[in-house]
Image (cartoon, grey):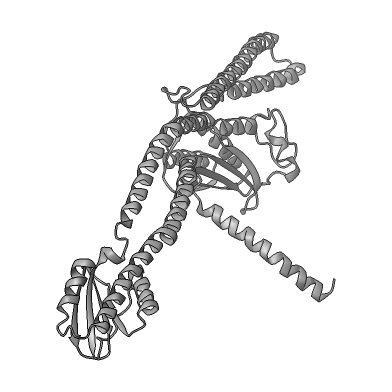
């Protein structure tokens, strides 16, 4: 591709890229909440409609009416000038003044002189000053000076004649549509009333959706649903709420069935293992039975893992837990294992979790790190939305290809290290199960310390 073709392609793509950037910027500026977006859907069209109506009204009605009124006043002033020039015998202009006052509703005076006052500064926005000036230029075609600024009800116009100055006072309402603001006030007032009604209506319609979202979020974090939760609102929201309640009940039944099944199986197997132990004890110290004793102990350990896995689903109330106290216990455990342990907390120490389950979650990972590493560092970052805990060590780590498999129940890692002390392969399965019951997850990666990093991330 030639340089010219490349330049042409870049020029053609530039507008599209700029448009995409503008769209992305606009998306970042817009609110993300349903309530705020619903208000924008109502307010923005209303504001645009009112703006268009106001512009059309200002352009077509207000300006047109003011122009016609100013033209009429200018014609009256031009008629007065014609009378003054046609009947010069009226020395004091008393009759012309009377006619202007009684017939044209103008107050005039003729003063000697040939100089007009210096021009006044033009106002930033004064439709009367602009239109009245245009009409005087078009109809009278003489030097003039006008004063339309201020709160006075009168408009002053001075016209330079041959050797005198005609001074005219006209009511502002004669040359200006002064009652136009009433329409604008009615329009703005009506819009505010409609927006208020819309806000109250939307609040009532969106509250059931927010309640449903809060209940789903609580259930996702493993917390109890609000006691007063019930499907409310529109039919679609009620159906969604009812479907959520039924889904929650099905999930809870499934969890209870799994827990009951694991507990029952573990209890039955434990009874059989007790018989095995009794028979082996009666058999005495026989070297040929040492392998069988080891198998029985392994099965006992596996059953304990079963029960621990089952206890992970037992319902526990969410309570407040202090991270510093929990990390102190972990430090004591590290001291017993003669390992170096350090911790760091960034954010609030108080967290809302199921304490026993959360303790098993973090304790499992820290105990494993203490078993296979000499130095362990735990860091907790508590933010507004997420609680992130990282467990770093300098141990042998886990191969990257096996990091997904170790979360499977009963998966045993033969090389580097085994994440379950008993070798049942349930350690990480229990940890991930507890993390997901809190609405989060557990992931593994390389640690900056050279070993393994286990990251726990759950909603705060």
**Taking 123 as reference, is 316 left or right?**
right
- Residue 118 seen from this side: yes
- Residue 421 seen from this side: no
List the single residue furthest toward the right.
1
Q: Residue at x 61, y 22 (%)?
A: 304
**Above or below, comparing residue 52 to residue 406 in the picture:** below
**Taking 283 as reference, is 42 left or right?**
left
**Front in this rendered view, residue 388 or 182:** 182
**Above or below, comparing residue 229 to residue 184 in the picture:** above
Q: Can you give x and y, in whole percent of width and height, for residue 175 in the image?
A: 30, 66
**Front in this rendered view, residue 232 or 316:** 232
Quarter residue 229 falls in = top left
Q: Residue at x 41, y 34 (%)?
A: 201
**Front in this rendered view, residue 401 or 19:** 19
Q: Can you give x and y, in whole percent of width and height, for residue 21 in the image?
A: 61, 60
**Taking 134 as reference, is 265 left or right?**
right
In what quadrant of the picture does the N terminus appear?
bottom right
Q: Residue at x 41, y 35 (%)?
A: 203
Quarter residue 168 falls in = bottom left
Q: Can you give x and y, in whole percent of width and height, for residue 37 in the image?
A: 49, 44
Q: How many marks?
A: 0
**Front in this rendered view, residue 60 or 22:** 60
Q: Can you give x and y, in whole percent of width and height, for residue 293 in the image?
A: 70, 18
């Amino acid at each position: 591709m030639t340089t010219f073709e490349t330049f042409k392609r870049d020029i053609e793509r530039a507008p599209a890229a700029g448009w995409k950037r503008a769209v992305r910027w606009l998306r970042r500026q817009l609110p993300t909440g349903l309530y705020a977006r619903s208000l924008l859907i109502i307010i923005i069209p209303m504001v645009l409609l009112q703006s268009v109506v106001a512009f059309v009204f200002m352009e077509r009605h207000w300006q047109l009416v003011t122009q016609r009124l100013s033209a009429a006043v200018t014609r009256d002033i031009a008629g007065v000038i014609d009378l003054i020039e046609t009947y010069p015998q009226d020395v004091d202009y008393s009759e012309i003044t009377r006619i202007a006052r009684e017939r044209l509703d103008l107050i005039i005076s003729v003063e000697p002189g040939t100089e007009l006052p210096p021009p006044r500064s033009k106002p930033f926005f004064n439709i009367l000053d602009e239109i009245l000036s245009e009409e005087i230029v078009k109809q009278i075609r003489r030097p003039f000076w006008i004063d339309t600024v201020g709160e006075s009800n009168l408009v002053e116009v001075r016209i330079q004649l041959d050797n005198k100055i005609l001074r005219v006072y006209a009511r502002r309402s004669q040359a200006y549509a002064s009652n136009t603001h009433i329409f604008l006030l009615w329009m703005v007032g009506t819009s505010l009333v409609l927006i208020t009604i819309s806000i109250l209506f939307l609040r009532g319609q969106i509250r059931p959706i927010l309640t449903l979202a809060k209940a789903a979020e609580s259930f996702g974090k493993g917390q109890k649903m609000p006691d007063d939760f019930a499907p409310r609102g529109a039919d679609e929201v009620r159906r969604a709420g009812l479907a959520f309640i039924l889904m929650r009940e099905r999930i809870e039944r499934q969890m209870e069935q799994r827990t009951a099944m694991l507990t029952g199986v573990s209890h039955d197997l434990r009874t059989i293992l007790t018989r095995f132990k009794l028979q082996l004890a009666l058999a005495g110290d026989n070297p040929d039975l040492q392998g069988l004793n080891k198998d029985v102990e392994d099965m006992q350990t596996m059953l304990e893992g079963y029960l621990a896995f089952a206890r992970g689903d037992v319902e526990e109330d969410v309570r407040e837990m202090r991270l510093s106290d929990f990390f102190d216990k972990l430090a004591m455990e590290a001291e017993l294992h003669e390992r170096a342990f350090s911790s760091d907390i960034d954010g609030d120490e108080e967290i809302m979790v199921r304490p026993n389950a959360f303790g098993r979650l973090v304790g499992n990972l820290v105990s494993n790190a203490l078993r296979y590493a000499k130095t362990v560092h735990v860091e907790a970052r508590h933010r507004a939305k997420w609680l992130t805990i990282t467990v770093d060590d300098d141990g042998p780590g886990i191969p990257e290809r096996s990091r997904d498999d170790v979360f499977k129940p009963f998966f045993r890692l033969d090389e580097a290290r085994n994440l379950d002390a008993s070798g049942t392969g349930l350690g990480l399965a229990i940890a991930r199960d507890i993390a997901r019951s809190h609405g989060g997850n557990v992931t593994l990666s390389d640690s900056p310390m050279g070993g393994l990093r286990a990251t726990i991330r759950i909603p705060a």
